[in-house]
Image (cartoon, rainbow, N blue to C red):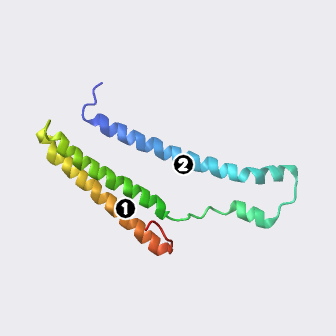
């Protein structure tokens, strides 16, 4: 059976579905492991402190975006954009038709990286943290 041009789309959506299910299963397992000590204590008939039970039953509060993670991702994206742009100039000698598409991809990657670095600065300012100088 030949899927032709649809093979990439099928592979992509299969990956997205598998990653989604894996995330759901991982969250379920993590929650189950968190509640396991509580279940064991109940089975042994031990007295449970209400504050401990409440802390274990409370949902995990998200901590927000880590500015350092954004900085690292931004630096990697900016570097990749510069690298793809340089690669376009080197590849032009061999395949001139690939110059403009590769240069465009490098510029897009550079813009996304710059946006992530700006987002890191905004998150730092909002959180009141101090990051890279």
Q: Position of residue 29 (x, y in %)?
A: 63, 47
Residue at the (71%, 64%) spot, across then down:
55
Identity of the residue furthest to the left in this view = 96
Residue at the (14%, 41%) spot, across then down:
92
Task: Give the residue at mark 2.
Answer: 24
Q: Secondary structure at mark 1?
A: helix
Give yes or no for contact between labels 1 and 2 (Cβ–Cβ under 8 Å): no
Horizontal placement of 104 versus 31: left or right?
left
Task: Give the residue at mark 1.
Answer: 116
| Relative depth, front residue between 36 and 83 | 83
Q: Which mark is drawn over residue 34?
A: none
Identity of the residue furthest to the front in this view = 133
| Relative depth, front residue between 117 and 57 | 117
- Which is nearer the N-term, disc 1 or disc 2? 2
As displayed, is residue 63 above or below residue 76? below
| Relative depth, front residue between 91 and 9 | 91
Q: Position of residue 87 (x, y in %)?
A: 23, 44
Residue at the (82%, 52%) spot, across then down:
41
| Relative depth, front residue between 32 and 81 | 81
Which of the 4 image quarters holds residue 62?
Answer: bottom right
Q: Secondary structure at mark 2?
A: helix
Horizontal placement of 54 versus 79: left or right?
right
**Rendered-image quadrant of the N terminus:** top left
Mark 1 or 2, closer to the camera = 1
């Amino acid at each position: 059976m030949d899927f032709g041009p649809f093979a990439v789309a099928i592979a992509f959506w299969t990956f997205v579905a598998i990653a989604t299910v894996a995330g759901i299963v991982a969250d379920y397992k993590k929650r189950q492991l968190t509640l396991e000590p509580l279940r064991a204590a109940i089975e042994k008939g031990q007295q449970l402190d209400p504050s401990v039970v409440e802390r274990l039953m409370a949902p995990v509060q998200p901590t927000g975006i880590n500015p350092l993670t954004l900085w690292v991702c931004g630096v990697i994206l900016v570097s990749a954009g510069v690298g793809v742009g340089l690669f376009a100039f080197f590849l032009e000698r061999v395949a001139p038709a690939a110059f403009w598409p590769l240069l465009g991809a490098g510029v897009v990657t550079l813009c996304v990286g710059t946006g992530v670095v700006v987002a890191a600065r905004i998150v730092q300012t909002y959180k009141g943290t101090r990051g890279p100088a």
